[in-house]
Amino acid sequence: MNQAPGHPLQADTGLAALGLAVAAFSLFAVGDAASKLVVAESNAGMALWGRSLAFAIVMLSLVRPRHWRSVLLDVPVRLLLLRSVFPFLGGVCVIASMAYVPLAQVTTILFVAPLISMALGRLVLGEAVNRWGWLAVALGFLGVVTITRPFGSDFSWVLLIPALGGIFTATGQVMTRLVAQRASPRSILVYTMLVALLLSTLALPFVWQTPTLRQWLFLASSGLCQAVGQACMIAAYVRAGASRIAPYSYAQLLTATLLGCLVFGEVPDPLSVLGAALIVAGGLMSLRLAGWRSAVAISLDRGVKQL
């Protein structure tokens, strides 16, 4: 997949776009931290359901009633439903791992998803990936190995949970490329939200614990941060284009690290820092040299004004 040109970046528009991008990715990290607090006080099932519910309320308020038919029915319904299962499974892995894995480590491992998506795009869709792209994938894999240390005495199987989440997320990204030509970004987001809410609600009888007021606030904060973060990210892509915005996604990793230290007392060890550096290097290399661009960003660039 060839790199599409970004929008011209003028001074005022560019600063606004970069500010929106940093805000978006930072909000994602704040939302994850709020979910981790719920997991610590309740359980992962409640955290997943509460975030899905809060995000759904925000999304439902943004879609006008007259657009519901086109959003839900004038699309490849079965393919969208199948595609939406994968980000949900990725979310399950992320939130489940928060009970055992530091926030920064979870976030770092998830950053291999675009690199896995690149490899899957080549293997499944036949997309072109040059040698720099494969080197980026190798760096990302090496980074995950450095963090998880599968052959050392410090290895814990729970570190594989966010790695599995990255695989699910990457599979969802590849499937997004399959549906992007037949469904608007709005439809993709709505189906993702509805599937997450439905599946997490089905699990409620097995995980329900009546939330305290403090937990309701954390649940609402998690969903609100995700929703506002999505809105900021879309606004940023409109102003500057994906190729200019994507490197600022690492603001999420920085914010997650800071929150992990300040809120949870989680200080990354040297090998975790090295692994994170390798994953970041691979991600930046893929953006600079591989000629590849996130399909979600492409679809947002093309169809965001329909929202």
Image (tube, rainbow, N blue to C red):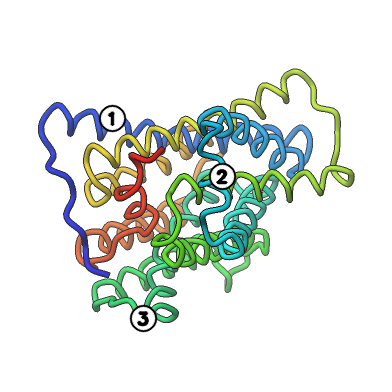
**Which element is circle 1 on?**
helix
Mark 2 crowd level (few <14, some 14–19, many ≥20, 10 Å Cα) = few
For image coordinates 52% across by 46% down, the residue present is 71
Dot 1 amino acid type: Gly
For image coordinates 49% across by 68% down, the residue present is 145
- Residue 69's label in the rendered image is 2
Q: Is residue 210 left or right of residue 189?
A: right
Dot 3 amino acid type: Gly
**Which element is circle 3 on?**
loop
The span from disc 2 to disc 3 (Cα, nearest Å) is 34 Å
Residue 73 point in image, percent of width and height: 57, 52
Front: mark 2 or 1: 2
The front one of 13 and 216 is: 13
Tell me if residue 175 comes above or below residue 220 in the rendering: below
- Residue 126's label in the rendered image is 3
Front: mark 2 or 3: 2
State the residue position of label 1.
19
Residue 107 point in image, percent of width and height: 50, 48
Mark 1 crowd level (few <14, some 14–19, many ≥20, 10 Å Cα) = some
Tell me if residue 2 comes above or below residue 211 in the rendering: below
Dot 2 amino acid type: Arg
The quarter of the displayed image where residue 253 is located? top left
Tell me if residue 144 comes above or below residue 138 in the rendering: above
